[in-house]
Image (cartoon, rainbow, N blue to C red):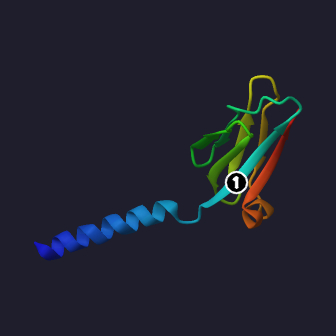
Amino acid sequence: MKKLFFFLLVLISVTGFSQNFGKTQINGKVIVERADVIGITVYNKTLSLGAITDDKGEFTLDVQLNDVIEVSAVHYKNVRFNVNDDILKSRSMKIFLI
């Protein structure tokens, strides 16, 4: 019984670790022409993860190489792009909406 419990504990730990494997947490900032940057949606379509900008336009999001990121706001055109090596190396991104 102890061996079975230990095996299940190890299996659960490995499964939890593998879900986070390969992801990089990035810090980003959305910059707009107007001052209203709070509440802009930044969504990782590949991993089904999202973030909403704070009052400074800043957000944090987990990404992997080639993930599809979509940024949307009511008064701006939606932006869609893929995560590249430069974003992963710098662990940051700036997004300009017009």
Q: Position of residue 48 (x, y in %)?
A: 57, 44
Horizontal side, residue 78 vs residue 18: left or right:
right
| Quadrant occupied by the N terminus | bottom left
In the figure, residue 2 lies in which quadrant?
bottom left
Task: In the rendered view, tell whether residue 6 sits above or below residue 64.
Answer: below
Is label 1 in a helix, a strand or a loop?
strand
Q: Amino acid at mark 1?
A: Asn
Number of numbered discs present?
1
Which is nearer the eye, 27 or 88? 27
> Farthest left residue?
1
Q: Position of residue 18 (x, y in %)?
A: 46, 65
Task: In the rendered view, tell whether residue 37 sits above or below residue 4.
Answer: above
In the figure, residue 98 lies in which quadrant?
top right
Residue at 77% across / 59% down in the picture? 87
In the figure, residue 56 lies in which quadrant?
top right
Residue at 73% across / 37% down in the picture? 71
Q: Position of residue 21 (x, y in %)?
A: 53, 65
Horizontal side, residue 20 vs residue 36: left or right:
left
Q: Position of residue 3 (x, y in %)?
A: 16, 76
> Farthest top residue?
75
> Farthest bottom residue?
3
Task: In the rendered view, tell whether residue 96 sits above or below residue 3.
Answer: above
Q: Which residue is mark 1?
A: 27
Residue at 72% across / 61% down in the picture? 91
Count residues near mark 1 (Cα–Cα under 10 Å), then give few for <14, some for 14-19, many for 20+. Answer: some
Residue at 71% across / 32% down in the picture? 38
